[in-house]
Amino acid sequence: MANHKSAEKRIRQTIKRTERNRFYKTKIKNIIKAVREAVAVNDVTKAQERLKIANRELHKFVSKGILKKNTASRKVSRLNASVKKIALA
């Protein structure tokens, strides 16, 4: 256990940040998973709906500083390619 006030504060901050990071990581994974599940069952309309939501959410995370711009763009691009693939098939 911490012996100094500053160390105790650091522990509190770390716990808070860890919880926040876990929340956003889970949210990102669930968004991507939803699109991939729709693609897996070849449901074009649902996949396109979820892709729109994913695009909006991921870019919102960029503006909040949670994701880097290139990371979000890469994720959206890959999801877009998979949705486009089933739409054309």
Image (cartoon, rainbow, N blue to C red):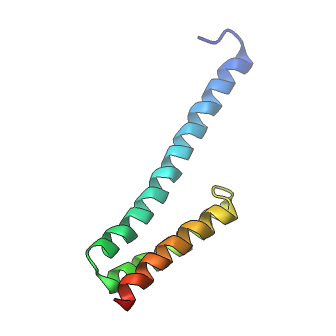
> Where's residue 39, x and y in %?
34, 75
> Where's residue 67, x and y in %?
63, 58
Q: Is residue 2 above or below residue 36?
A: above
**How many dots with numbers?**
0
* Residue drawn where x is 50% and y is 51% of the image: 25
Between residue 70 and residue 63, name the one nearer to us. 70
Q: Quadrant of the C terminus?
A: bottom left
* Residue drawn where x is 68% and y is 65% of the image: 69
> Where's residue 23, x and y in %?
49, 49
* Residue drawn where x is 51% and y is 71% of the image: 78
* Residue drawn where x is 67% and y is 8% of the image: 3
Task: Please say whether residue 63 is visible from this viewpoint.
Answer: no
Q: Is residue 82 above or below residue 87?
A: above
Q: Is residue 46 above or below residue 76?
A: below
> Where's residue 42, x and y in %?
28, 80
| Residue located farthest toward the left when viewing the structure as drawn | 41
Please indicate whether residue 77 sits to the left or right of residue 67 in the image: left
Task: Please say whether residue 72 is visible from this viewpoint.
Answer: yes
Please indicate whether residue 76 sits to the left or right of residue 70 in the image: left
| Residue located farthest toward the bottom when viewing the structure as drawn | 88
Q: Where is residue 63, by image quadrant?
A: bottom right
Please indicate whether residue 23 sits to the left or right of residue 50 in the image: right
Between residue 10 and residue 70, name the one nearer to us. 70
